[in-house]
Image: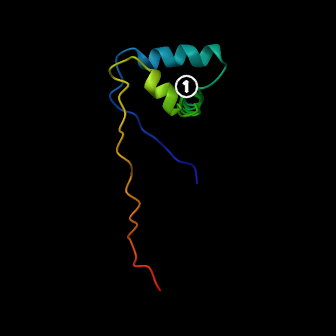
Amino acid sequence: MTEQLLVRGLPDGTKAQLKLRALGSSRSIESQARQILVDSLNVPAPSLVEMLADPRPEADFDWEPVPLGLTLRSPEF
């Protein structure tokens, strides 16, 4: 099944810029938007070293590990 997405509230001029880019690529606006989304999401996740090296204050990330839900058990003799 193909997924669909409706995007509302784009800043003024966004659709016009997308249309120009689509015309330059000989694509429809929909096809161009799809390609931009796919390309932007196909970026590998940064490594821990890359995240630590990022000097931007907005590049914060969560150090809390996800609980695994494991419990201790008594040793059997």
Instruction: Answer with the quarter of the image where residue 8 lies.
Output: top left
User: Colour scheme of this structure image?
Assistant: rainbow
Residue occupying image coordinates x 46% and y 41%: 5
Q: Nearer the viewer, residue 62 or 76?
A: 76
Residue occupying image coordinates x 38% and y 48%: 65
The mark tally for this picture is 1
Q: Nearer the viewer, residue 42 or 45?
A: 45
Q: Position of residue 52 (x, y in %)?
A: 44, 26
Instruction: Answer with the quarter of the image where residue 56 lies.
Output: top left
Q: Is residue 26 above or below residue 61?
A: above
Q: Position of residue 43 (x, y in %)?
A: 57, 30
Q: Left or right: where does residue 39 sit relative to residue 52?
A: right
Q: Residue furthest bottom?
A: 77
Residue occupying image coordinates x 42% and y 38%: 6
Residue occupying image coordinates x 32% and y 20%: 57
Q: Position of residue 53 (x, y in %)?
A: 46, 21
| Quadrant, the N terminus | bottom right
Helix or strand or loop: what does disc 1 sit on?
A: helix
Q: Left or right: where does residue 59 sit relative to residue 31?
A: left
Q: Which residue is mark 1?
A: 29
Three-letter residue code for mark 1:
Ile
Q: Nearer the viewer, residue 67 or 39?
A: 67
